[in-house]
Amino acid sequence: MLRKIIDDESGKKVDEEVMNAITIDCVVFGFNEGSLEVLLVKHATGISKNRWGLPGGWIKEKESINNAAKRLLKELTGLNNIYLEQLQAFGEPKRFPLGRVITIGYYALIKSDDYDIVAGFTAAEAKWFKISEIPELIYDHSEIYNFSLRKLKRRVRQAPIGFNLLPEKFTLLDLMHLYEEILEFKMDKPNFRRKFLKMKLLIDTGEKQKNVSHRAAKLFKFDKEIYKKLTEKGFIFEF
């Protein structure tokens, strides 16, 4: 706790007790077998014991917020060396039951198959949930999650995002399912194919799916240079 001299509404100096507490909360999205997922942890201790929430925790006194986000994610879930993008601060006075705590939200997009999730630190369990099956979350974590999902919906229309979520080689149907999951509506397959191929973003690998029960589809990969340019410049992708 800190004490601080502030001006009240009348301009009078008053002595007020304030809490200087900052935490981190991370929204990590993955894509697995056609479903968009989010990574959650079950708390092992404290007032939120046995409840699900976003990976996060307290910032150490001499630690930057970016380093704190990376440390907490690694300690709680085993995730390491992933790119985290800062969302914003969430600071409603009553968001934390025991006092005033401000949290800095981060989010990430990863290929979930590329990482082994291992619960640790104050997490009893770490698990991927389909976005349609998310349990009740602690504090204001649903608000933070919904904010990040809205950001992802905007981003998918303005910059390519599949590089972070799809395997190196994928079908156009895989790509369309990713967009359908994020935007939450069904798309017209021929229209999606025409618009995406028009951007020259995809490279035909000359390969097809193997060991499938249906007609094997072509496999594509992203052109890294064009992907980088479109990520930096942006575009408007209307479906």
Image (spheres, rainbow, N blue to C red):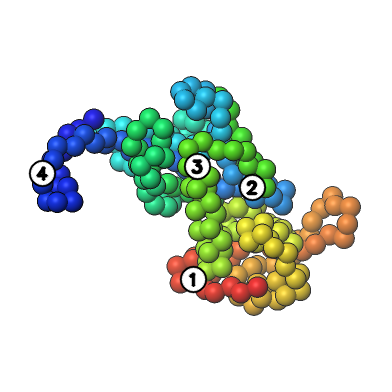
Using the numbered discs, state the Cα–Cα distance from disc 2 to disc 1 in whole angstroms.
26 Å
Q: Earlier in the sequence, mark 3 or mark 4?
A: 4
Residue occupying the point 77% across, 63% down: 218
Quadrant assignment, res 239: bottom right
**In front: mark 2 or mark 1?**
2
**In front: mark 1 or mark 3?**
3
Residue occupying the point 46% across, 23% down: 46
Residue type at mark 1 is Gly
Residue occupying the point 64% across, 77% down: 198
**In front: mark 2 or mark 4?**
4
Q: Nearer the viewer, residue 153 or 172?
A: 153
Residue type at mark 3 is His
Query: Looking at the rendered structure, which numbered label has been put on residue 131?
Result: 2
Query: Looking at the rendered structure, which numbered label has been put on residue 234?
Result: 1
Q: Nearer the viewer, residue 211 or 190?
A: 190
Query: Looking at the rendered structure, which numbered label has been put on residue 141?
Result: 3
Lateral position of residue 200 relative to residue 19, left or right: right
The image position of residue 232, as x and y in percent, is 45, 67
Residue type at mark 4 is Lys
The image position of residue 130, as x and y in percent, is 66, 45
| Disc 1 to disc 3: CB gap under 8 Å | no
Does any portion of residue 226 appear in the rendered image?
yes
> Circle 4 — which element?
strand
Query: Looking at the rendered structure, which numbered label has been put on residue 13?
Result: 4
Q: Earlier in the sequence, mark 1 or mark 4?
A: 4
**Alpha-carbon neighbours of circle 3 within 10 Å: few (<14), some, or many (≥20)?**
many
Q: Is residue 49 above or below residue 64?
A: above
Using the numbered discs, state the Cα–Cα distance from disc 1 to disc 4 in whole angstroms.
49 Å
| Disc 1 to disc 4: CB gap under 8 Å | no
Residue occupying the point 72% across, 67% down: 187
Does any portion of residue 121 appear in the rendered image?
no
> Circle 1 — which element?
loop
